Image: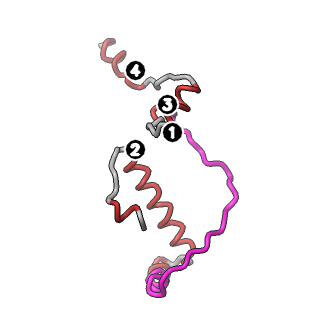
Amino acid sequence: MRKNCMKANSRQRKKRTTASNLEARFDAGEDVLDYFDVSKAVRGDLPPQSVKVDLPAWVVGVLDIEADRRGVPRQSLVKFAVVEWLEEQSKKRRQGQKEPLAAQTV
């Protein structure tokens, strides 16, 4: 039984590397997340930044309808949608999935 525990523990160990090796891997575009415990990652208290985005009137209208339906301001709905989309993209990248070219140019 102890042998099984050792196998489980060895799988849970984080990879080890040097800072220069990690930097070289990152610069080469390799995934380096295996070297970090992302479950403890925090973004900190970064100040918000404003972004101006021009959208067609019909998109603003649909956003307003959805924001009213949810009972939130349009800006909150947009922030939520952007964060949700970014998290989905990050998850896809970690899983090695690539998006179609048309989706990347939006």
Name the spot of residue 65 as percent of width and height, x first: 45, 84
Amino acid at pointer 1: Val
Q: Is residue 95 above or below residue 5?
A: below
Q: How far is mark 4 from mark 3, CA to CA?
A: 16 Å
Q: Quadrant of residue 66?
A: bottom left
Left or right position of 74 against 90 = right
Residue hosting label 1: 38
Label 1–label 2 contact, CB within 8 A: no
Q: How far is mark 2 from mark 3, CA to CA?
A: 13 Å
Residue hosting label 2: 94
Farthest residue, direction front: 28
Extent of the magenta region: 36-65
Q: Is residue 70 above or below residue 3?
A: below
Q: Is residue 40 above or below residue 77?
A: above
Q: Which mark is residue 9?
A: 4
Please state which of the two labelled residues, at mark 3 or mark 1, is closer to the viewer: 3
Name the spot of residue 86 as percent of width and height, x first: 47, 57
- Judging from the image, what secondary structure is the residue with disc 2 in? helix
Q: Is residue 3 magenta?
A: no
Amino acid at pointer 4: Asn
Amino acid at pointer 3: Tyr
Nearer-N-terminus badge (4/1)? 4
Of residues 62 and 5, the one nearer the viewer is 62
Residue in the image at 49% along x and 64% along y:
82
Q: Quadrant of residue 104?
A: bottom left
